[in-house]
Amino acid sequence: MRNSIAVTALLGALTLGGCEVDLAIPDYNNPSLEELVSNPTPTLVNTAAQGLLIGTRSQMASRNGYVSLLGILGRESYNFDGSDPRFITEMLDGDLDPGSPAFGANLWNQRYQNIRNANILLNALDAVQGMSAQELEAIRGFAKTIQALDLLLVVNTRDANGAVIDTDRPVDADPAPIVSKDAAMDYIAGLLDEAEGNLAAGGSSFSFLLTSGFDGFDDPASFAQFNRALRARVAVYQGDWATALTALSESFIDTGASLDMGVYHVFGTGAGDTRNSLYDPGAGPDILAHPSIVADAELQPGGAVDERVGRKIRSVAGQTQQGVTTDVAFTIYGSSNTPIPYIRNEELILLRAEANIGAGNIAPAIVDINFIRENSGGLAPRAGLDATNILDELLTQKRYSLLFEGGHRWIDMRRYGKLGDLPLAVPSHQVNAMFPIPEAEQLARGG
């Protein structure tokens, strides 16, 4: 099955460089890497392309990974792991530590490792023999899209602290500079647009196999719709409403299709595969939901709670850690094989509403918001929406529709200057606005 493609560790030892690893030292246990650089073949190129999907999945579903940690910061989730109090002391009660590789310095190396892997693949395309021009263009479009996504995840965590965008330097060069958030977002937008052009010239199929998470988006034309969906998200984050609406029109947005239609990270339990570790089958789970999710939920006309809460949240025995108490947990990830969305149709509809709000087009935004209220939440249409209250309504719908899928609540509340509206379980707690640049990266640039 395609859920767990067997990909060699062709690029597994690579990282950004300039900090802790000397990439000039040959990996004698991995000769295929040298072959990819010096004598690329179609097989090596296709394997490396597949490997990017393994890389972009890294640290998404681990218990101290992207979904989990951003969920904690956005007051969607808690982690009551009794063996590591930092899930509360650092994430909720203190500052994120740039020297803490599992927390404050986390969610950096894995992304840049995959970005550099894509650079090596892109450089190999200039030398490989035996592949058509269309096959090469398709891989270029695929690799650049994955690079843009990985870099967006860096910016999502570091925000105003910035990011590195000059990632294709020689291994013995000085570390690349850290640029501003705006510069990084412009670079991401440009990379996605370049990739779209490559995909348009990429023929009718990829030369490598994508995972089942890309079913329906596994040829250059349909993958370009995924690319445009990501471009729309980036444009919304930039406040570039016109570009967002154009990109959405070129994506897979469809109010006549399933709200879950989209592209997904897939997981497996086979040897060497990655599990979705957010799944906890125990009667007393330690990854728990924030009680405000239930307390703040709107009721359906018949009196039942918002259907999204019913689908995603369950009651459990109350637990308390370091003064923090909750009695609800998630049902979103029902097994260690449950996929996590890259992006799906429901988000696209809400992004369209957000872009229309930003552009002053309130009427179509109301239509999309009420569509989600009715079709995802089972709620009545919201009457009385206007320019004064529609943004708060949008953020509420995004909160429940995208719950615990990828840090959307934290990112959205930060973008609109509303982090102070997130609830504090204990008065001494704070809401950290961004992850720091890892200490090793700071020291490599002179501290």
Image: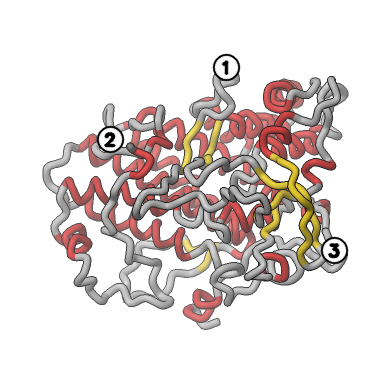
Residue 280: percent from the left, percent from the top?
59, 50
Of residues 279 and 137, which is closer to you in this image?
279
Query: Can residue 275 be seen in the rendering of this structure?
Result: yes
Report the disc number at residue 206: 2
Assess whether mark 2 and mark 3 are in contact (beta carbons under 8 angstroms): no
Q: Is residue 58 left or right of residue 42?
A: right
Marks 1 and 2, how far apart at CA? 28 Å
The answer to whether residue 359 shows anywhere in this view is no
| Residue at image point 61% right, 55% down | 68
Distance Cα–Cα, label 3 vs label 1: 44 Å
Residue 261 vs 19, above or below: the answer is above
* Nearer to us in this view, 121 or 184: 121
- Which callout, 1 or 2, points at the residue further toward the start of the chain? 2
Give whichever of 189, 50 is nearer the camera: 50
Amino acid type at image mark 1: Gly
Residue farthest along the front direction in this orientation:
283
Q: Measuring 24% from the left and 37% from the top, which residue is drawn there?
A: 207
Q: Which mark is residue 426?
A: 3
- The image position of residue 429, as x and y in percent, is 81, 65
Question: Is residue 24 shown above or below 225?
Answer: below
Q: What crowding class fits label 1: few (fewer than 14 Cα within 10 Å), some (14-19), or many (20 or more)?
A: few
Image: 27 above or below 412:
below
Query: Residue 108 at what x, y percent from top left?
Result: 50, 63
Coloring scheme of the render? secondary structure
Circle 2 packing at 10 Å, graded few (<14), some (14-19), many (20+), is: many
- Kindly check if marks 1 and 2 are in contact, taking CB atoms under 8 A apart as contact: no
Secondary structure of the residue carrying numbered label 1: loop
SS of the residue under disc 2? loop
Q: Which mark is residue 256?
A: 1
**In front: mark 3 or mark 2?**
3
Please report whichever mark, 3 or 1, sits nearer to the chain's N-terminal start: 1
The crowding category of the residue bearing disc 3, from other C-alpha atoms within 10 Å (few below 14, some 14 to 19, many at least 20), is few
